[in-house]
Image (cartoon, rainbow, N blue to C red):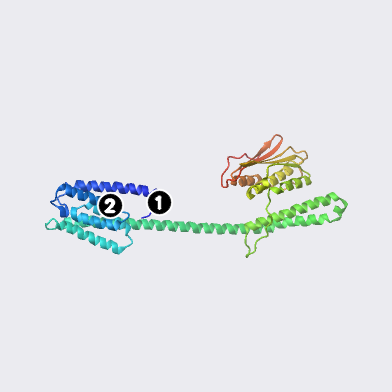
Amino acid sequence: MAADGSARGPAHGLDAALTAVVVVIGVVDTWIKPSNGLLTGAPTPVVAAVSGAVGAVLWWRRRRPRTVCVAVMAGYLTAFTPVALAVALYTVGDAAHRATRVLVLYGLAGCAVGLGALAADHAPIDPREAGYVLALILGPLVVGSAVGMRRDLVAAARAEVAGLERERNLVVERAQAEERARIAREMHDVVAHRVGNIVLTASALKVGPLARAEPAVGDAAEQIRAEGHHALEELREILGVLAPSRGGRRAPRTPQPDALQLSQLVEHANARGQRARLAVNGHPEVLPTQVQRALYRIVQETLTNAAKYAPGSEVTVTVDCRLDRIRMAVTNGPATRPLPLGLPPSGGNGLIGLTERVTLLGGTLAYGPHQDGFQVRADIPHPPRTGHGGPGLEAAP
């Protein structure tokens, strides 16, 4: 019977203890019992030695249960060792519980050996004593078989539970895929439609008479059109993730943002009227893709928040690439202009989403008031330890 190392140690210890107990019982019983099988009348030390040897054979009962049982039957007939025979028959019943023929064969052989041992006394067989002997032989065989069948039933039940768990997981995954497809359709029907209208309106404004009369209006319209077009490209990428397959067709994929585009983010912020500057120490472009994407999203979100809630403030983005970690800080000062009317709606999930993204990389994200402004700090190990959770994070004010 194969077993791993963790199970083999306790099993061997149990076998050793059981074998020792049976040997001691067999040796002690030699001086107590009136009959010693075929050795009845032989010197007691000889019978004790044979009884102890029969009990010692049980050490190999797990590896060779049938052979050991045959040897113990011979020992039982020779020196009357009932305890050793009971253990051997139990082991055979456990090991061969699926083989009915083997159980019947060993049951009949045990009964024959038991009755033969009684006949060795050269006295009439007492029916009551014969019943006790047969019960001692057949009982362990039946109990061992029942234990083996119970083990099979438990294993089958566990396998069935595991199968049901896998089936449940498949159902959950299918439901999640359907939900992602539904979300993708909703985003396409609502968000993409409205952003598309914004892009079309900005394009019309750019070529309209007002833009020709006021170049600044045309520049603003071009910025709106470019930002809207970029938002549509990223939205298509998200739709491709949420609904990866539509009749075998995949949504068009666009290049993922990386650390090389941080300077473009800062340039676009300055073009929108913000005062932003970028300071980089090291080479973030060689970092893993998921880390570069996290840095990009942090800068993107914080620049947007500064433009919305601290207009006119100076924003400083610093990226420090060290040998074992990457530290980023985005700091904005106080607002120098009044808040614009009609701020775009916010779900308040931007910084929470950034926190989750950084935590998945094994890092931490902290944010809160800094001097008269606001600061977001990220600390990401290199290489990223995905799946680790970071320490407690500062709550947004």
Amino acid type shown at disc 1: Asp
Q: Quadrant of residue 186?
A: bottom right
* Residue placed most toward the observer, 189 or 55: 55
SS under mark 2: helix
Decide if residue 152 is on the left or right side of residue 397.
Answer: left
Percent x, y of residue 221: 80, 52
Which element carries disc 1, helix, strand or loop?
Answer: loop
Of 5 and 255, the residue lying toward us: 5
Q: Is residue 283 above or below residue 73?
A: above
CA separation, marks 1 and 2?
A: 21 Å
The residue singled out by tag 1 in the image is: 4
Amino acid bearing label 2: Leu
Give me the disc on residue 58: 2
Q: Residue furthest left?
A: 123
145 left or right, relative to 275? left
Residue 55: which numbered mark, if any?
Answer: none
Q: How many marks?
A: 2
Q: Is residue 32 visible?
A: no
Res 147 quadrant in image: bottom left
Residue 167: % across, % down: 50, 59
Q: Which quarter of the figure is the N terminus placed in?
A: bottom left
The residue at 20%/57% (across/down) is: 114
How many residues crowd mark 2 within 10 Å: few (<14), some (14–19), many (20+)? many
Q: Is residue 333 left or right of residue 113?
A: right
- Could you say which quadrant of the image residue 185 lies in? bottom right
